[in-house]
Image (cartoon, rainbow, N blue to C red):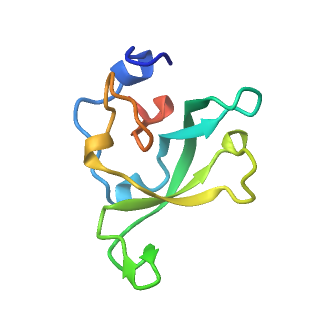
Amino acid sequence: MEDGIEDVYSRSQPSTMPKIDKLLVGKRLEILYKYKEPRTGEEVLEWNQGVVTLVSNGTNLQKSARSFYKEGEAVLIDFDKKCLREEKKSVYTVKLKKSKWNPKNNYTEGSWRLDLGEIK
């Protein structure tokens, strides 16, 4: 992916964002993360794929010690092993912002979309 250039994955996405509810459980998503390239130290953006295992309902995913993500605000994702770097675990809570859904030409950390295998 080059900065500012739309890719085939982006063009293949549905025009409307999928609803963030229990029907998303079992679906594969791609989340864009920023990493430092070990050889050069340069920051790069990289899509990471994984399966949604849980969707926030207001009481099941903690945001902090005293608060929870609102209903449909975040998901628990089990990322593919190939996406892990130095991380010891593969399951992470990810906030899915509506403004970051398939951003076309405006890729930033936290952007998200369906994995191509989920697109029918």
Where is residue 46 drawn, in percent x and y?
56, 32
Q: Is residue 93 above or below residue 28?
A: below
Identity of the residue drawn at 73% across and 44% down? 85
Q: In this view, does 99 lie above or below 21?
A: above
Relative to the observer, which residue lies in front, 38 or 2?
38
Where is residue 58 drawn, in percent x and y?
32, 76
Where is residue 109 drawn, in percent x and y?
45, 40
Relative to the observer, which residue lies in front, 60 or 86?
86
Q: How many labels does the image show?
A: 0
Residue 63 shown left or right of residue 100 in the figure: right
Residue 83 shown left or right of residue 28 in the figure: right
Residue 69, quarter of the rendered image: bottom left
Identity of the residue drawn at 39% across and 53% down? 24
Residue extending farthest left? 16
Residue extending farthest front? 41
Which quadrant, please, contains the C terminus? top left
Residue 9, quarter of the rendered image: top left
Identity of the residue drawn at 31% across and 24% down? 104
Residue 93 shown left or right of residue 66 in the figure: right
Q: Is residue 120 above or below residue 6?
A: below
Where is residue 50 drawn, in percent x and y?
57, 46
Identity of the residue drawn at 77% across and 28% down? 39
